[in-house]
């Protein structure tokens, strides 16, 4: 069996929040943005991560590349725990893990030309390359992501959102990473352009044999691109399964609710489908509910859910729920209430 | 990955295409600035005033320190501004050509303003950017130092310096330099804090770019708009400070002079009726002030990222 490229164990990120006007001696409040996440990522595999906005997806991604302090482990394929590395030791791994950001324009320095932007990781990790070599590689990469190489001297504000995201992708891929983390790469784009960018990512992944962590806040976006999907809620894993399993037979009430919000193109199927509304607001991560964090909005919640937190069952289709079951059971439970 | 010959040919062709020139944000700003009439007028005035300050003395009848003893006894009647005598701005109370003195005084004032502004741009920008970018305890300490320095009455310090080490230009520059960067550091730090969370900074961090390189490559260029605006507004402030010190009689040492010194002399002699001794330096002072304010204002509008 091949080794996983990345093995994340019990990853936790806790922010210490101080409010304006707090006295220096008051204890800061703890915000558990990520509360113990586990997953394995095989080389070339795509893991989709889905959850409402504010549930800790970006924080999880940033913890892996040491941009926020985290506890737990993130073991790279060579057996090294990335979270235990000093910033200097981490440098070596930064070219292996690259990131694509949510806001295409904001992720590009407005004062730099496209060429300077794309070449930055390259010259950082390979300072010995000649100017001509760098330029040639940048142009080849621009061509690969569907940008005209002769635009190399233009500035970000001269491009559309979709093109800006292609620039961001080119910048990430120029150092030939093994893992690409895409943090909601299409959320800020028009629907028509979303598909283009996703197709581009899928094409590049195939060509380059990349592993990918693809973050999105709705399930429809990750469906095509992911091999496996992990559903997060308040920084905890609710359900992990292969893309096919998760969409055809979701077991967790939260996943079912998310899925029921995805429109189906076929009008007849759309009408026949059961909606599981998500009532109420996302609880504050400063005061998460006891037991199962989803219980305040769960149609199937019972006394036990408040008492103890469900754990992920082992296996291929993992669910963290005391009463997992197919959609029909959730709908029945909902109607009984 | 195997590319067919046709693909390769097409790729080579695309790579060899002529590069398109980009329109940099600076070019846009320059175009916007040039459309602003008040700012362009201000800049034009500044050029004229500077030309006068640096080359005016060539056209004066005498040097700024030559005393015309034959007329110094009755400046009110013999030292009026006149084209015939060549004393276009008249004589000062000691019988020196005011045209030459105004040119020399304007030069000192402009240099004081520019030196103060340059120190604030270099020191203040780096200090503020480092403080804001590093953050945490370093930021706290660096900003408390600025607070403490700002709390010291700077006029008192400058006067103390001048009294202790004697009146000299370098002391004046030192005093003004010590003070000028403080508020710049604060402004830059505030801007850095907002810039720091922008995604392109995170992208550079994720790429492994070193902290100081990030400050120089990503933070400072994005601050330069604000820094430029603030620096142009700082020049008149520095000129005012120098004028005030000169007004107190602690500025540059005679026979050197500055606009503030000239105005102070002119104001003193007003009661003798030699009003031109006040009016000419005052006019140059005000024109310079307004010109800098207009230019600063124009820069602010031109570089304002809001309408981009
Ligand atoms: N630097 C930070 N300091 C404090 N709290 C943070 C910070 N970054 C994120 N958070 C909090 O952590 C939670 C998760 O945020 P985030 O990971 O950005 O969510 P998502 O990407 O899923 O929308 C939010 O409640 C957010 O307010
Ligand atoms: S554990 Fe209980 S509250 Fe949580 S999802 Fe399952 S049924 Fe709902
Ligand atoms: Mg996010």
Image (cartoon, rainbow, N blue to C red):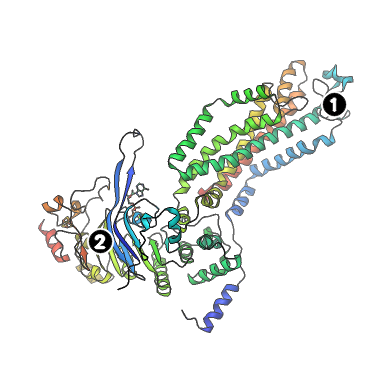
Which quadrant is the N terminus of chain A positioned in? Answer: bottom left
Give neighbour class at mark 1: few <14, some 14-19, many 20+ (Cα, 10 Å): some
Same chain check for tags 1 and 2: no
Could you say whether the residue bearing mark 1 is in a helix, strand or loop? loop
Question: Left or right of A337: which side holds B194?
Answer: right
Q: Could you tell me if the residues under marks 1 and 2 are in contact, i.e. CB atoms within 8 Å?
A: no
Instruction: Name the residue carrying label 1.
Output: B66
Question: Left or right of B262: which side holds A127?
Answer: left
x, y percentage for residue A263?
28, 66
Q: Residue at image x 49%, y 81%?
A: B3
x, y percentage for residue B101?
78, 29
Is residue A186 shown to the viewer in this render?
Answer: no
Give neighbour class at mark 2: few <14, some 14-19, many 20+ (Cα, 10 Å): many
Nearest the eye: A289 or B272: A289
Nearest the eye: A268 or B298: B298
Instruction: Name the residue carrying label 2.
Output: A258
Nearest the eye: A128 or B290: A128
Looking at this view, name the residue that lies furthest to the front. A79
Could you say whether the residue bearing mark 2 is in a helix, strand or loop? helix
């Amino acid at each position: 069996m091949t080794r996983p490229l990345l093995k994340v164990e019990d990853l936790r990120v806790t922010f210490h929040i101080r409010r304006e006007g707090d006295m220096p001696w008051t204890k800061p409040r703890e915000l558990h943005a990520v509360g113990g996440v586990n997953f394995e990522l095989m080389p070339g595999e795509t893991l989709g991560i889905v959850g409402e906005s504010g549930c800790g997806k970006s924080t999880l991604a940033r913890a892996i590349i040491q941009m926020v302090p985290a506890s737990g482990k993130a073991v790279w394929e060579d057996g090294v725990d990335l979270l235990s590395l000093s910033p200097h030791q981490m440098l070596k791994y930064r070219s292996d893990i690259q990131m694509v950001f949510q806001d295409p324009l904001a992720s590009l320095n407005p004062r730099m030309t496209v060429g300077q932007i794309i070449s930055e990781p390259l010259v950082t990790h390979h300072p010995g390359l000649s100017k001509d070599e760098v330029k040639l590689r940048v142009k080849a990469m621009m061509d690969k992501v569907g940008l005209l190489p002769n635009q190399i001297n233009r500035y970000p504000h001269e491009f559309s959102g979709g093109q800006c995201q292609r620039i961001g992708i080119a910048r990430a891929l120029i150092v030939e990473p093994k893992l690409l983390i895409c943090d909601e790469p299409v959320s800020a784009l028009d629907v028509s352009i979303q598909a283009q960018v996703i197709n581009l990512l899928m094409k590049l992944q195939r060509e380059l044999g990349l592993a990918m962590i693809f973050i999105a806040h709705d399930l429809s976006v990750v469906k095509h691109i992911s091999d496996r999907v992990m559903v997060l809620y308040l920084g905890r894993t609710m359900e992990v399964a292969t893309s096919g399993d998760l969409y055809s037979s979701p077991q967790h009430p939260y996943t079912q609710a998310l899925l029921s919000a995805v429109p189906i193109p076929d009008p007849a199927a759309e009408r026949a489908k059961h909606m599981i509304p998500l009532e109420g607001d996302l609880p504050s991560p400063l005061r998460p509910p006891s037991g199962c964090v989803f219980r305040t909005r769960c149609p199937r919640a019972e006394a036990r859910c408040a008492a103890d937190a469900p754990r992920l069952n082992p296996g291929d289709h993992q669910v963290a729920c005391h009463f997992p079951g197919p959609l029909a059971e959730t709908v029945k439970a909902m109607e009984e209430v | 990955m195997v590319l067919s010959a046709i693909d390769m040919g097409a790729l080579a062709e695309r790579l060899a295409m002529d590069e398109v020139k980009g329109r940099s944000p600076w070019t846009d700003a320059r175009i916007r600035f040039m459309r602003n009439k008040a700012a362009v007028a201000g800049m034009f005035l500044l050029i004229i005033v500077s030309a006068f300050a640096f080359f005016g003395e060539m056209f004066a009848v005498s040097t700024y320190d030559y005393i015309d003893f034959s007329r110094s006894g009755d400046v009110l009647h013999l030292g009026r501004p006149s084209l015939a005598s060549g004393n276009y701005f008249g004589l000062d109370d000691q019988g020196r050509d005011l045209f030459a003195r105004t040119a020399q005084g304007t030069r000192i004032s402009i240099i004081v303003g520019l030196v103060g502004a340059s120190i604030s741009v270099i020191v203040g920008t780096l200090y503020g950017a480092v403080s804001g970018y590093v953050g945490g305890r370093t930021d706290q300490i660096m900003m408390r130092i600025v607070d403490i320095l700002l709390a010291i009455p700077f006029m008192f310090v400058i006067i103390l310096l001048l009294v202790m080490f004697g009146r000299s230009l370098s002391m004046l520059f030192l005093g003004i330099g010590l003070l000028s960067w403080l508020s710049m550091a604060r402004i830059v730090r505030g801007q850095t804090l907002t810039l720091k969370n922008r995604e392109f900074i995170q992208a550079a961090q994720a790429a492994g770019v070193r902290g100081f390189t990030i400050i120089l490559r990503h933070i400072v260029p994005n601050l330069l708009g604000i820094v430029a605006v603030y620096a142009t507004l700082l020049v008149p402030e520095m000129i005012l400070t120098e004028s005030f010190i000169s007004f107190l009689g602690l500025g540059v040492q005679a026979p050197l002079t500055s606009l503030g010194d000239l105005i102070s002399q002119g104001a003193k002699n007003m009661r003798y009726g030699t009003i031109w001794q006040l009016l000419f330096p005052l006019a140059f002072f005000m024109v310079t002030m307004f010109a800098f304010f207009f230019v600063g204002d124009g820069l602010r509008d031109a570089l304002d990222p809001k309408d981009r």
